[in-house]
Amino acid sequence: MVIIGQLLELSEKINVIIAAKNMDKGVTRGKIGLKSGVLMSFNERTPDDPVKLLKIKMAAKEILGTDVN
Amino acid sequence: MVLGIVILSATFYFFAIQIEAANVNSVTLDGIHAAKKSFYDLEQNDIRTLKASLTGFVTNQQYKDIYNTNDRNALYNATSDLYGQYKTLGITQFSFIGTDSHTFLRMAKPSYFGERVTRTSFITAQKTHDWGTGLDLDATAFALRVVHPYYNGNTVIGYVEYGEEINDFIRTIKQETGNDYGIVIKKQFIDPTQWATIRRTAGLANNYDDLPDYVVVDSTTGDVSDFKTYGFTEKDLDTVTDEGNIFSRFSNGRSDYVSGGFALYDGSGAKLGAVVVIENVTPMEAAARQTNLDVLIVVILATVIIGAVMVIFVNRIIIRPLDRIVEETTRVAGGDFDTKIDVQSDDEIGTLAEMIDGFRQIVMNMSKELEENQQKKE
């Protein structure tokens, strides 16, 4: 069974943190993408992938300095 | 860049100091050569002057007639005014020597007569029946002498000698160059008893034992006893060359000096010792140091300016375009495909930007195709 929406949801949580920290959205997302090895381009149809989710969370923690759950 | 400036400056200064020392030695050596030339030029000039004066005297029949009377007092009285005039010109020695090689009258000390003359200038005149000239060292004075036979018709009736002490030489050269000079003679040419008498008569301490093998007979530095401290060794004197060479570099008080010298010969060609030259190189060193400092400042300023220009150039041509490529590539990785990687340059950086922008478009198209495929599946 495929779970839809988790990657987009995580992506939006990251956007909120970036905005709260007043960081450059494009560059910060790009850093997370390069760190995790995942292209940070998601929409509502992007299939969820637990491995990608974990990699993005770890990269986001490192780049943003905070846990994203 | 700072490290580069420090290394460059240190390297420059090291070589500048080496060059400065070489220049100082070179200038001093030139000074020694010039002093030697002046010394021997003075000798030749003074020989000509002495000869001219002596020629005038030995052709004067009036004096010759008095000499022929063999009356020492009459000769002294007749020539004392002339001798007084000579002394004002530096001609301090005026002697009549008999054909038996003994002094008949010595104008400087009329009571001293009858001593046997063995000086080279006299021997030469005696042998050649013509001029005998040159530097002679006898027991009492080191002097430039000219001797000429005293003719009565074709018969030699004696010899007349004019001489000047050569301390005037080194003082004249000092006036020309500002350097100090000393005449240092091997002991074998000096009678210690008579030297002691000369020094005592002049009211000076006997310096005969100051050095083991040499005696400083004259100097321009005050008392000759002081001169032995002026940066030379007896080994320097033993090995001094005819053309002149540097001895050493030394300090005295707050001044730096370079010593050197050239060999000194008497009229017979015997090497008597050396003329020692002492040059105060403090002003020369100070000028060289100032020049080095000026050049060093120019080098540092030039390095800073060139370095700054290079930093600006590298930043504008390489760093800033690369930063833009990195930033825009990062945005693409963040899902922002609309940011065109736009770096306009005709070099490798421009090529790299163009290539990465091509990848941006490929990723953007792949993402759209993937999205369209997902829409179709649904």
Image (cartoon, coloured by chain):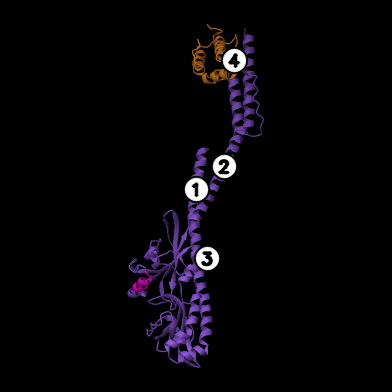
Chain colours: A orange, B purple
Q: Which mark is residue A41?
A: 4
Tag 4 secondary structure: loop
The residues tagged by marks 3 and 2 sit, at their Cα atoms, a distance apart of: 41 Å
Indicate which disc, 1 or 3, sits on the residue closer to the N terminus: 1
Was residue B197 drawn as part of the magenta stretch in this picture?
Answer: yes
Tell me if residue B68 comes above or below residue B355 in the rendering.
below
Indicate which disc, 3 or 2, sits on the residue closer to the N terminus: 3
Mark 1 vs mark 4: in front: 1
Q: Amino acid at mark 3?
A: Glu
Question: Which stretch appears magenta?
Answer: B195-203
Q: Are marks 4 and 3 on the same chain?
A: no
The residues tagged by marks 4 and 2 sit, at their Cα atoms, a distance apart of: 53 Å
CB within 8 Å, label 1 to label 3 = no
Question: Can residue B33 be seen here?
Answer: no
Q: Amino acid at mark 2?
A: Leu
Q: Which residue is mark 2?
A: B301
Q: Amino acid at mark 1?
A: Tyr
Disc 4 crowd, CA 10 A, few/some/many (<14, 14-19, 20+): some
Indicate which disc, 1 or 2, sits on the residue closer to the N terminus: 1
- With B271 as the anchor, is B35 left or right in this view? right
Q: Which residue is mark 1?
A: B13
